[in-house]
Amino acid sequence: MKKLELHLHLEGAAPPSFIRGLAQEKRVDLSGIFDERGSYAYDGFEDFLRVYEAATSILTTPQDYARLLAEVLERCAEEGVIYAELFVSPEFCGGADLGAWRDYLAAMVEVADRMRAQGIDSRGIVTCIRHFGAERARKTAICAAETAGGWITGFGMGGAEGVGKATDYDWSFDCAKEAGLGLTCHAGEWGGPESVRQALDLGCTRIGHGVRAIEDGQLVRDLAEQQILLEVCPGSNIALGVYPAWDRHPIARLADAGVRVSVSTDDPPFFHTTMRHEYNRLADVFGWGDEEFAQINRWAADAAFCDEATRDRLRKEFQ
Ligand SMILES: O=c1[nH]cnc2c1ncn2[C@@H]1O[C@H](CO)[C@@H](O)[C@H]1O
């Protein structure tokens, strides 16, 4: 089955073997972030963020990012993904310096172009990191605005949702919006309905996760009416303990209430998941079949940060 994936962190998709290989080449000891089986080792969300940033610290050149993107898109293609949107962070690509960012981006665009010819289309969503604060987010937003168009089609925010309010970052989202970028923000993963409302106040048409909106009936109705798409990552939510088990996950209840949802893997090796695994679990637990999967992919196509020709092409795949 073909699939669209809208919520995938580039560094978070790095296989442990890729990070270990790079560490060996650079003679850096990163053994502390892996368990005895070679998987990423972390305990809870805060620690996940720490290990994520430690793994990412080995990526120091445009060439490292080019290699990573090639590896990640190849794996996407193996999972049947035909179009992926990746969160990319100028913070990790030269410290949100515009000149450095342009070099990293050029290296990634070359790979994205090559992979498109091999059947996997992609776009980049420049992402600021909430726990790095509003000031640093501005520098990221400027990188986004200055390189908008082409491969970069969106702007978003990830990181620790408990830090401040989403609206503290309004300057950055306004800047990105003026540059014509699509907007999405992580919310309603660790924060409740109020956090989702703040993301809507920023002008987002999509919400990263957003699942805790289920706790507020009026918000659920608003999301449905405004056709806001939730980038849902069920396996991530289970792995990090947002919900205790698949059958407690609200994705099916949200969809039944008329909220548009899509399915993604977020940081697949961290959560021991793949797109196939997500679809299989949804089929097992909620009885989803071809019709439901076609529907979530049509919703994803409608909400994708892409040009209209691409959107039409993607929609046709799921008619
Ligand atoms: O599941 C998640 N929830 C919230 N933030 C995340 C998640 N995965 C990654 N990041 C955040 O996104 C940044 C890079 O895109 C990472 O630095 C991390 O802070």
Image (cartoon, rainbow, N blue to C red):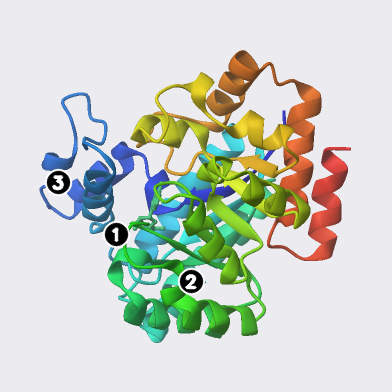
The disc placed on residue 105 is 2
Looking at the image, which residue is at 18% across and 46% down? 24
> Nearer the N terminus, badge 1 or badge 3?
3
Residue located 32% across and 43% down the image = 18
Residue 221: x and y in percent read 71, 48
N-term mark: 2 or 3 = 3
The residue under label 3 is: 30
Residue 83 image offset from top left, x and y in percent: 67, 48
Q: Is residue 289 above or below residue 105?
A: above
Q: Nearer the viewer, residue 248 or 298?
A: 248
Residue topped by disc 1 = 59
**In the displayed structure image, the side of residue 133 where residue 279 appears, left or right:** right
Quarter of the image with the N terminus is top right
Depicted 45 relative to depicted 10: above or below: above
Amino acid type, callout 3: Leu
What SS does tag 2 mark?
Answer: helix
Three-letter code, disc 2: Leu
Q: Secondary structure at mark 3?
A: loop
Question: Where residue 198 appears, x then y in whole percent?
Answer: 52, 65
User: In the picture provided, is 228 more to the left or to the right than 6?
Assistant: right
Tag 1 near tag 3, CB within 8 Å: no
